[in-house]
DNA sequence: TTTATTTGCGAAACCGGTTGCGTGTTATCA
DNA sequence: TGATAACACGCAACCGGTTTCGCAAATAAA
């Protein structure tokens, strides 16, 4: 095991009595090498179990054939599906993916970006942190020429590839659906004021409210902590008073589903009788929850595929990503949690 | 953007009028460089935004600080949690992780192993395919000295690090629980005859049956396809006849949960009245399913952490992984799907 | 003061492929 | 048959750090 006498291009050259350069060119199927020599080289390479060294070739080519994928969370049906979509594409195109999880911490996001400046990856796919207070680290890496594509959670004022869903419309549709189901006091539970996609969902949500003359529009959006305990506390306080509590909620992220179901159970609030719920979620199990959860289902897999395609073509064709914005529409999957009882 | 005039060690050397070697040593805080020079180098490096080149250092050191993580699926609460556990550890130790998804195909697994022989990763963490008919590719890579750790789905006859749960006992406990709940005809739904962990679960399951003198033990294990349509067909045919169908099922993997719930709904079989169900699963939503699902919950996060720790210490300390087997016990989370009505 | 030792740094080989250029050989054409 | 072109391959620099070795100057010991 210790004697890793790996075979290099030099080994092959020595065995065949030819030069390194010739072996290298033969392996690349270069036109300036005869077929006879190529065959001999291939045979020897095979026999000696030759494997080209990633570092050596990367040193010259400055290409790693790897892409960084940065996500806030992985135990999440949206992000895991998106990653699967990414992997499907990158695998076909011969790219490797490096996964980084930020846990929604900008500090960790910054550390990751430091690591990526060593040429380890050829491009970056990222869905940014919830508390996205600063994006200098992103700009800095991009300034070195690193291609970067945002998916889902984007930084609005950085001009580069973006793949998102139709957030405004989705927020609008969600609210409209609840209103159509008879809700009079509709709320939006968000987890961040900074994320542009959540802002857009809120805008769409508010638009629907104002169009339908729902009066609590100004006081209808709540920021919920993602810390388990705080989260449940906040929701509990918001839902405790039967006279003040909403009769319809749009949940901005899947993460909040369990807390809300938990609190409703604890407070004996029945969904959908007392409270109608709709959630931005990709949960496979939505139909089998109790009650079945109405969702705004994002095309997570497709978003991943599109993002991966964009970054790959940016890398190989040196394609500019400015003004490349792809919008994959979400769909409303109506289930019992939001239906008239 | 095109002018990527990156600064190298040479740039710094030229600016300061010293040699490459000195700069390199200064950056490594070598004892043979004066503090004055080190400071000058650090300052210049900072000023010029110097970033060491991953390929150049890797070429010498033969270390990539990267670990491959190979899983059959990622949209799965067990595997995504395990990956999160892995990432927690590797991130702390300065390792990157490359994710590969096999979709349970040996062919893809083999392709991945070919890719990993170029020095791109320093070690491998893998949970093998369902149809694990051959493991030559794994042995071949290990023969080159590549450290490898199996987690959850292991190859029994390859001697290396393994992190698993107590599969026999879990299978035993699952069956015992159903029997205690009054089931007379208990079945095990598996997805593979080849996976040793499933074999062990089955063994434990059968042991419980025989100890309790359940008579259908010989005819109680069914292999279910993971193809959606075939899967539902098989389950439907197994559950159709009210006189022949089981009154208790142990589901070996999370993947089969939805099909079973779906078929039961379609056939109007009520869980747990007509059929009690228990599933090997890490689903966060188990409590909120209808009915809440009794699970054998594997310590997925911990399994990931342990596996990552093992591989890291194998890489850095050249620690041998033979006979390194870590068993993280699962727990039985009893919910309504298996309880006496 | 002389010798021995330590300190600080430069020169150059090295890691393993890649590539431009030059050269000798063979094929082509007038 | 001589000039030209196509072909096949070797040589050596190069990518950007790392590391060994050696040397000169500074310091310590004799």
Image (cartoon, coloured by chain):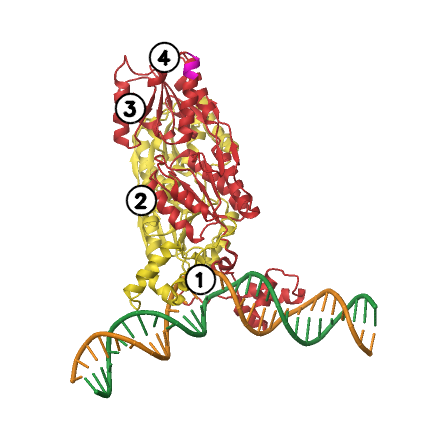
Chain colours: A yellow, B red, C orange, D green
Characterize the local packing of mark 3: few (<14), some (14-19) or many (20 or more) Cα atoms within 10 angstroms. Answer: many
Estimate how packed mark 2 is, as few (under 14), some (14 to 19) or many (20 or more) residues with alpha carbons within 10 Å.
Answer: some
The chain carrying label 4 is B
Q: Is residue B74 left or right of residue B27?
A: left
Q: Is residue A225 visible?
A: no
Q: Which quadrant would residue A29 be assigned to in this image?
A: bottom left
Drawn side of residue A111 relative to residue A286, left or right = right
The residue mark sitting in front, 1 or 4, is 4
Do marks 3 and 2 share a subunit? no
Task: Please tell me in which quadrant of the rendered image residue A286 appears.
Answer: top left
Residue A116 percent location from the top left of the image: 47, 54
Circle on res. A302: 2
Q: Chain of mark 1?
A: A
- How far apart marks 3 and 4 lie (CA) works out to 21 Å
**Front position in the image: B32 or A38:** A38
Do callouts 2 and 1 point to residues on the same chain?
yes
In space, the residues marked 1 and 3 are separated at their CA atoms by 54 Å
- Residue ID for mark 1: A59
Q: Which residue is mark 4?
A: B215
| First in sequence: mark 2 vs mark 1 | 1
Instruction: Tell us which disc is closer to us: 3 or 4.
Output: 4
Magenta span:
B208-212
Q: Numbered disc 3: what chain?
A: B
Circle 4: is it few (<14), some (14-19), or many (20+) Cα within 10 Å? Answer: few
In the rendered image, residue D12, in percent from the top left (x then y), is placed at 45, 74
Question: Does the magenta segment cover residue B209?
Answer: yes
Q: Secondary structure at mark 4?
A: helix
Where does label 3 land, which residue?
Answer: B235
Closer mark to the observer between disc 2 and disc 1: 1
Q: Which residue is found at the position 49% from the left and 41% from the top?
A: B86
């Amino acid at each position: 095991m210790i004697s890793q006498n790996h075979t290099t291009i030099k080994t092959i050259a020595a065995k065949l009595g030819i030069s390194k350069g010739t072996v290298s060119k033969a392996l690349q199927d270069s036109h300036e090498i005869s077929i006879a020599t190529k065959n001999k080289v291939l045979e020897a390479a095979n026999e000696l179990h030759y494997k080209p060294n990633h570092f050596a070739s990367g040193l010259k080519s400055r290409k790693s054939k790897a892409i960084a994928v940065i996500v806030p969370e992985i135990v999440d049906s949206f992000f895991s599906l998106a990653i699967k979509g990414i992997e499907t594409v990158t695998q076909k195109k011969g790219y490797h993916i490096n996964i980084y999880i930020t846990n929604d911490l900008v500090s960790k996001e910054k550390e990751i970006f430091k690591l990526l400046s060593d040429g380890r990856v050829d491009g970056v796919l990222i869905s940014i942190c919830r508390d996205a207070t600063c994006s200098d680290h992103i700009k800095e890496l991009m300034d070195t020429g690193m291609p970067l594509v945002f998916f889902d959670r984007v930084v609005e004022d950085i001009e580069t590839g973006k793949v998102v869903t139709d957030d405004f419309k989705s927020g609008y549709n969600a609210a409209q659906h609840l209103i159509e189901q008879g809700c009079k006091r509709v709320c939006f539970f968000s987890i961040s004021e900074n994320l542009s996609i959540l802002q857009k969902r809120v805008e769409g949500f508010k638009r629907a409210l104002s169009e339908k003359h729902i009066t609590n529009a100004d006081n209808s959006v709540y920021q919920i902590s993602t810390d388990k305990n705080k989260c449940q506390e906040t929701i509990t306080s918001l839902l405790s008073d039967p006279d003040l509590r909403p009769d319809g909620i749009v949940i901005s992220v899947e993460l909040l589903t369990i807390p809300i179901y938990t609190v409703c159970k604890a407070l004996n609030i029945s969904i959908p009788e007392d409270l109608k719920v709709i959630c931005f979620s990709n949960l496979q199990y939505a139909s089998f929850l109790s009650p079945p959860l109405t969702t705004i289902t994002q095309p997570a897999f497709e978003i991943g595929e599109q993002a991966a395609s964009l970054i790959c073509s940016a890398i190989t064709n040196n394609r500019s990503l400015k003004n490349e914005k792809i919008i994959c529409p979400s769909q409303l999957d109506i289930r019992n949690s939001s239906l008239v009882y």
